Amino acid sequence: MKVSVIASAIVAASIVIGGGCAAENGSAVPAKVAAEAKRQAAAVTFPRVVIPTDAGEFWFQPASCSVGEEDGSQVFTIHGPGKGPDGKPVYVDIDGADQGPMGDTDVRIHVGVDAKFKHGDPAWIFNAAVAHGFDVPASVARVDGDVVVLSGLIFSADGDSRLEVTGPVRIDCSR
């Protein structure tokens, strides 16, 4: 997929650059074609993320996916729309850090919504407080370059309900 994204970006850049050169020669590329090429070059997508749970698989397509360093920790912010096991829309927000001094991770699955800043019902939440409430170890966040792997997640919607993640969640933020 990475090769095809790079190839698309190269083709789009060639059209845009070629359009500028052609304009100088009197045979300009139409503005719509140049605009579409720019849009395609900017439309790099991240791989779909699957969250396997004991209630089925949630998945989402990251709209934003970033990994960086802050105060000696690898920090990450990922969010995007997807679907729940029942086909309902979800929006997933993930903010956290590896196990350094900022090692808390917050993961929220908003059910019934497909955009950021909307709140669905229920909102499945994982963070240190939820783990503590269930008397389970906090999750493990491992960052390797632009790849984030989360394991040991247990969500709750109300403090009593429980949704267990049955395997690691792998998020690739590389472009």
Image (cartoon, rainbow, N blue to C red):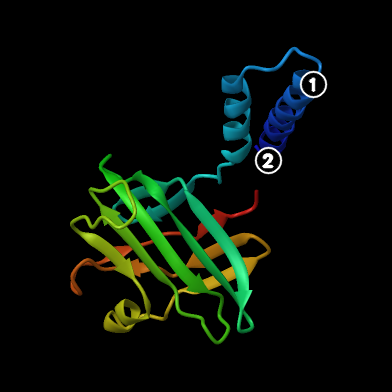
Q: Earlier in the sequence, mark 1 or mark 2?
A: 2
- The residue located at (29%, 53%) in the rendering is 55
Asked if 24 appears above or below 115 in the picture, the reply is above
Q: Residues within 10 Å of mark 1 (few under 14, many from 20)?
A: few
Q: Position of residue 41 (x, y in %)?
A: 63, 36
- Residue 7 numbered mark, or none: none
- Furthest toward the bottom, the residue is 101
- The residue located at (20%, 74%) in the rendering is 159
- Tell me the quadrant of the picture where the N terminus can be found: top right
Q: Residues within 10 Å of mark 2 (few under 14, many from 20)?
A: few
Q: Amino acid at mark 1?
A: Glu
Asked if 7 appears above or below 130 in the picture, the reply is above
SS for callout 2: helix
SS for callout 1: helix
Residue in front for this viewpoint, 144 or 93: 93
Q: Quadrant of the rendered structure where residue 43 is?
A: top right
- Residue 2 numbered mark, or none: 2
Q: Amino acid at mark 2?
A: Lys
Instruction: Describe residue 148's horizontal placement relative to residue 55 as left or right.
Output: right
- The residue located at (45%, 49%) in the rendering is 50
